[in-house]
């Protein structure tokens, strides 16, 4: 404690690195988004909110925005519905429990890119193994072109999104369940409460803070998730599976509308900051309790 | 009358069965396609007529796997070593000092953790381009380093907090300097936590997609995810048996490492975040 500057010196390198790599780009994006970027031939450098106005007028952006909402809500909600029962099951004592745990955690261990590539092949219309499995089981009598239209591609992408979100969510809930003391259940059983009542009256209320945290964290991750959709369909066919991140990537690196791409980035940052603020509030409340 | 545990086992596995099937399905697809002879890949049969292990060797040569593997290792090692070296002092300061800005730094970490590279990808590209660093594996490693700092500081701090101060205080009483105590007493106790954090950072960098996709434009600098993606994207004929062999080789070692260490990740995050 001799040197009062010491803690600042110790944290400085990490601050500088983050400032250069994270905050410099943010400032740069604000610059581009509020300026004309050599596209209209106008020399007026500051264009205010024109790029944002162009976004709002672009039906592809609005569709991608709405689809991002559907994507995020469906994946986060689906993962929640799957993970709660899975966590409750994994928290009971049965033969092969550690094997079951490993299997449930597996999708987390594989990179999203690789998962998406494997599914892209498995969903191949002509020779994909999902079609041959479905036909072999008598569940389908013709090949389904899974990725050829959004009506089948997008639900599949949501399903894969749920699958890769379940491990993390289940892990959070297992942590929550292990904090519930067993005597609560014993007391409830003595009072004659059945398993369903025990779940509704004990498990679920005590799990609720963990559910909240899982919802907020998953919302942030899923909202930002790029590889599944990009690898499987690149937002296609005809932009029909685009979400904000893939729309942003196309604007920036395919079409070259840098101003609008930066505006999308800033809109996403704003949404993320709201989620983060919610998370910080939830986490701080947890710490005080 | 069956034993209650046996009954529970049947119910548990029965309920988990759909999830287990859907989880294992891609692994089955990956493995079975990888070992199929080339002419059987496009016929919709499940089981290969013979296991063609040579596919792995051919893939390695044909798909330029070796170089991509080296690039991935290179980038991930830079990211990991850099992130750990920068995070240890920060996490130590967060754990052992009370200073103005302590809370602000914590919140700063949380916020930067929430921002993923995809949101900033255009700005990141322009940042690297302005220094002429597009195509630079070192620069990509640096970007990974920066995006992992929040995670590594968070993990390390939550572990450092569990180490009792008495040990360090005892060493100070004996006349050991702060630096000596840090080196001889504190850090040796933290080796397991540092190792686990380093491995997760490594896996994060190993799996990263969008930054590599954007910054690395030529085959010589592709990392594994980009290399495998380039075998699939925008091609009329995809040699799926090679692609699946490549995903398998790129995935399995890291997956085993992850499953083995996953409980430490949970413990570390739980100590810090989900109290």
Image (cartoon, coloured by chain):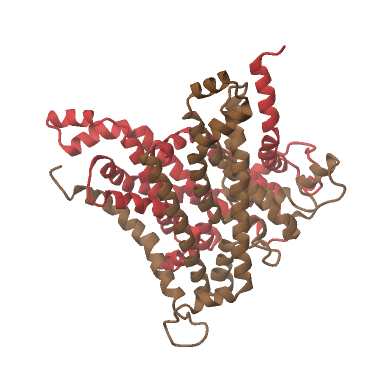
At x 45% / y 37%, what residue is drawn? B265
Residue B151 in the image: above or below residue B140:
above
Q: Quadrant of the N terminus of chain A?
A: top left
Q: Position of residue A105 (x, y in %)?
A: 57, 36
In this rendering, would A166 be left or right of B270? right
Q: Nearer the viewer, residue B229 or A163?
A: A163
Q: Quadrant of the C terminus of chain A?
A: top left
At x 42% / y 54%, what residue is drawn? A277
At x 66% / y 61%, what residue is drawn? A241
Residue A253 in sight from this viewpoint: yes
Q: Position of residue B119 (x, y in %)?
A: 49, 61
Q: Position of residue A253 (x, y in %)?
A: 55, 69
Q: Nearer the viewer, residue A102 or B227?
A: A102
Q: Position of residue A142 (x, y in %)?
A: 86, 50
Residue B61 in sight from this viewpoint: no
Residue A159 in the image: above or below residue A181:
below
In this rendering, would A177 be left or right of B6? left
**Figure colour of chain A:** brown
Residue B128 in the image: above or below residue A194:
below
At x 87% / y 47%, what residue is drawn? A141
Location of residue B3 by image quarter: top right
The red-tinted chain is B
* Furthest residue in direction right, as rendered: A141
């Amino acid at each position: 404690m001799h040197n009062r500057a010491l803690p600042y010196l110790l944290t400085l390198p990490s601050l500088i690195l983050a400032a250069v790599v994270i905050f410099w780009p943010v400032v740069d994006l604000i610059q581009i988004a509020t300026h004309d970027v050599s596209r209209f031939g106008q020399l007026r450098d500051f264009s205010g909110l024109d790029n944002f106005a162009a976004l709002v007028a672009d039906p592809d952006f609005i569709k991608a925005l709405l689809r991002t909402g559907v994507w995020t809500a469906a994946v986060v909600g689906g993962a929640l519905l799957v993970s709660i029962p899975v966590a409750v099951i994994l928290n009971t004592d049965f033969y092969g429990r550690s094997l079951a745990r490993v299997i449930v955690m597996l999708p987390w261990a594989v990179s999203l890119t690789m998962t998406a590539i494997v599914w892209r092949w498995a969903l191949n219309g002509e020779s994909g193994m999902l079609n041959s499995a479905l036909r072999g089981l008598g569940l389908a009598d013709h090949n389904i072109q899974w990725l050829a239209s959004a009506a089948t591609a997008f639900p599949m992408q949501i399903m894969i999104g749920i699958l890769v979100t379940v491990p993390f969510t289940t892990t959070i809930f297992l942590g929550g369940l292990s904090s519930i003391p067993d005597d609560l259940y014993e007391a409830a059983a003595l009072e004659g409460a059945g398993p369903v009542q025990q779940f509704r009256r004990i498990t679920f209320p005590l799990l609720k803070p963990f559910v909240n945290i899982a919802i907020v964290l998953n919302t942030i991750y899923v909202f930002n998730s790029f590889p599944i959709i990009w690898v499987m369909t690149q937002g296609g066919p005809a932009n029909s599976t685009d979400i904000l991140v893939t729309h942003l990537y196309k604007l920036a690196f395919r079409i070259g509308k840098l101003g609008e791409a930066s505006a999308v980035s800033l809109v996403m940052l704003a949404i993320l900051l709201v989620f983060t603020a919610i998370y910080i509030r939830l986490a701080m409340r947890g710490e005080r309790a | 009358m069956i034993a209650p545990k046996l009954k529970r086992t049947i119910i548990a596995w029965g309920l988990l069965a759909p999830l287990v099937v859907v989880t294992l399905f891609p692994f089955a697809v990956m493995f079975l396609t990888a070992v199929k002879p080339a002419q059987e890949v496009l016929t919709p049969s499940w089981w290969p007529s013979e296991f063609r292990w040579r596919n792995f060797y051919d893939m390695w040569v044909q798909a330029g796997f070796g170089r991509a593997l080296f690039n991935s290792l290179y980038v991930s090692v830079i990211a990991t070593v850099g992130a750990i070296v920068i995070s240890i002092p920060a996490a130590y300061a967060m754990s052992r000092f009370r200073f103005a800005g302590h809370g602000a730094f914590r919140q700063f970490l949380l916020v930067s953790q929430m921002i993923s590279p995809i949101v900033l990808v255009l700005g990141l590209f322009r940042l690297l381009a302005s220094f002429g660093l597009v195509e630079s594996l070192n620069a990509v490693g640096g970007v990974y380093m920066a995006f992992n700092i929040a995670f590594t500081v968070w993990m390390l701090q939550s572990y450092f907090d569990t180490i009792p101060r008495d040990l360090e205080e005892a060493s100070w009483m004996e006349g050991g300097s702060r630096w000596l105590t840090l080196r001889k007493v504190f850090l040796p106790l933290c080796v397991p936590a540092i190792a686990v954090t380093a491995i997760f950072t490594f896996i994060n960098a190993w799996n990263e997609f969008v930054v590599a996709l954007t910054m690395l434009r030529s085959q010589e600098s592709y990392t594994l995810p980009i290399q495998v993606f380039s075998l699939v994207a925008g091609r009329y004929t995809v040699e799926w048996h090679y692609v699946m062999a490549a995903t398998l080789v790129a995935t399995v070692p890291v997956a085993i490492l992850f499953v083995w260490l996953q409980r430490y990740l949970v413990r570390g995050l739980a100590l810090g975040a989900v109290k």
